[in-house]
Amino acid sequence: MTPILETRGLVKRFGGVAAIDGVDFRLEPGELRCLIGPNGAGKSTFFKMLTAQYAPTAGQILLDGDDITDEEPSEISRRGVGIKNQVPDVLDGLSVRENIWIAARGRHDTAGADHAVSEILERLNLGPLADRVVGKLSHGHRQWVEFGMVLAINPRLALLDEPTAGMTAEETRRTAELIREMNRSMAIVVVEHDMQFVRTIAHRVTVFDQGRILAEDTMDRIQVHPEVLRIYLGTSGHA
Amino acid sequence: MFARLSETQSVSLPPALWWTAVALALAAGLAIPSFTGLDVHLDLSIIFIFGILALSMGFMWGQVGMLSFGQTAFFGLGGYTYAVCSLNFGETTSAMLLAILLPAIFATVLGYFMIYGRISNIYFTVITMVVTIVLEKAIRATSDESFVIGDVWLRGQNGIAGLPDLQVPWDPATTLFVTEVYYLAFVLMMAVYVGYRMLLRHRFGRVLLGIRENERRINLLGYDTRRYKLAIFAISGAVAGLAGGLYAVWGNFVAPEMMNLNSAASVVINVIVGGKATLLGPLIGTGVVQWLTAWLGTAGVGQVNLVLGLVLIGFVMLFPQGILPMAAGLGREALEAARQLFRRRDLAAAALRKETNS
Ligand SMILES: Nc1ncnc2c1ncn2[C@@H]1O[C@H](COP(=O)(O)OP(=O)(O)OP(=O)(O)O)[C@@H](O)[C@H]1O
Ligand SMILES: [Mg+2]
């Protein structure tokens, strides 16, 4: 089966630092994968390269087997890739409704967009906030708005960078539910630090460290993987 | 401080009320000539024409976040297009249409290189400013009699005078006089205002607002923002060209000053004074500055530009959002204060009732 997403020898250098240092990654259609790794491992950089927010220094990115390495962010989006960035990346001066409408209108006519917006507002419990200006909402609510935008473009591959950061325990639980539900119609890669959360949603986990893939396995085996334990717990236990 | 849509929304009216306001404004504008003299028609016409120019700049700046300092390049190009074509053709309808079309094409080409060349916002501003100055200098350099387009000599810094009056398209024997030019300028200003406003209600305009807020996010949603920015730059070039054509008709005259730094800055100042968050702001700002300039002139202050400059600096420091949002803010506060007052009175009355009941 052709993977929905594949990278070959992907490298990103910022000056002398290789934030991504030769990543070969494969994701099967419909898969739900978690990406974990210590701070600065390159997870967000990886996502930004997949969506052309950063141009690779070297390597290739393939979507459904098509080389998209040199495409524009808008083209990649129209191929069906949606991203929620780590820092809430929304339209702060516009209302919740307008944020989601603009996203939906790119894939639907006006009536379809209106319909999609009310559906998404309902699904995310954002109805009461629909006419509020997004910039004045809490961090958690802005995350939901960005979720709403990703849902509105109905992607085939969703990239979610730390979706539960700043959320309450209840919101985190709902997010896990939402991600599993989304996974029925799309492949998803989730970057998360919350191991409990990772365990509840993912089958396979990829561990990044210093711009490389350190390990890739089921959660149970990742938890006892010696290399993973070393980077998370420190070699001599001073972490 | 940059005005956000939150402010825009609070200033703008619900659609039904807005349409009523537009209809009332239209009626008022059309009624004014019947009880004023030609001098008033002339003065108001030029405010409408500069208002159209300010709108072309203010829309891009306030709604899209693109600060074009050189809308006067398209304004001047529109004026000179009207001049050269009307004198050559002996016919004004096509001259006026070309005064819109040519600046639009020029804006498309210029915009293509700037926007697809991925220059930063600040360079966009600088380049547009440089372009208007270069055009001005180029026109100034045409005083030699060899600079002729068709039968028309460009005349360098002297400008081209004696331009034909605008003909009625279906009846070329009839030309527009002062009061008819007033009607034309007024109706076109209203049309441009309504047009821009309608734009904001649809996908194209919403995406433009989104670009102002967060261009990267709009790209990630699948919109190629370059196309949207180029389109609005071309449209605004056309609108500025229209204003230039009207200016040529209004004074039967064009000159390189239409494009100089002074004129370019005036457009920006008009927008700042009125406030860029709304579409009404640039129009109000143009009216206020124009009126202030005229008043300072008649008041015999002498250094009109200096005083005007000081007044404007004071304005910007006192009302950084422009006059209109400031006025709307005051109105809102007054309303809120009144509401509080009534609520307190109701509460007091209720407490009193409760006390007397028990
Ligand atoms: N725009 C940039 N310019 C320079 N260096 C960068 C840039 N973006 C990221 N880096 C560097 O690249 C490395 C990887 O950063 P990245 O944000 O991808 O890590 P991460 O795995 O997402 O970390 P976290 O868990 O903290 O979000 C870091 O060393 C970071 O400092
Ligand atoms: Mg990160």
Image: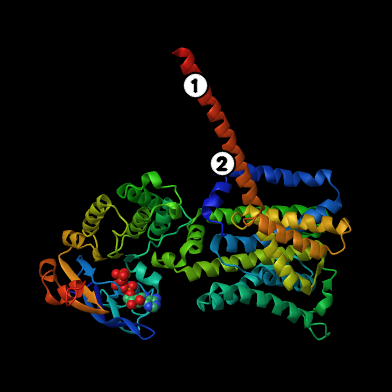
Tell me the chain of label 1: B
Q: Nearer the viewer, residue A173 or A150?
A: A173
Q: CA distance from mark 2 to mark 1?
A: 36 Å
- Residue at mark 2: C-beta within 8 A of ligand 2: no
For image coordinates 58% across by 48% down, the residue present is B11
Going by the numbered disc 2, the residue's amino acid type is Ala
In the picture of the structure, the residue carrying the numbered disc 2 is B16
Instruction: Give B185 or A95, whichever is nearer the viewer.
Output: A95
Task: Place residue B164 in its image quadrant.
Answer: bottom right
Determine which residue is flagged by label 1.
B350
Secondary structure at badge 2 equals: helix
Do circles 2 and 1 both sit on a common chain? yes
Q: Is residue B51 left or right of residue B163?
A: left
- The tag earlier along the polypeptide, 2 or 1, is 2
Residue at 72% x, 73% y: name it.
Answer: B261
Above or below — where is A176 with respect to A20? Answer: above
Q: Residue at x 78, y 45 (%)?
A: B32
Residue A200 placement, left or right of B291: left
Q: Residues within 10 Å of mark 2 (few under 14, many from 20)?
A: few
The percent coordinates of residue B179 (x first, y second) are 81, 52
Q: Secondary structure at mark 1?
A: helix
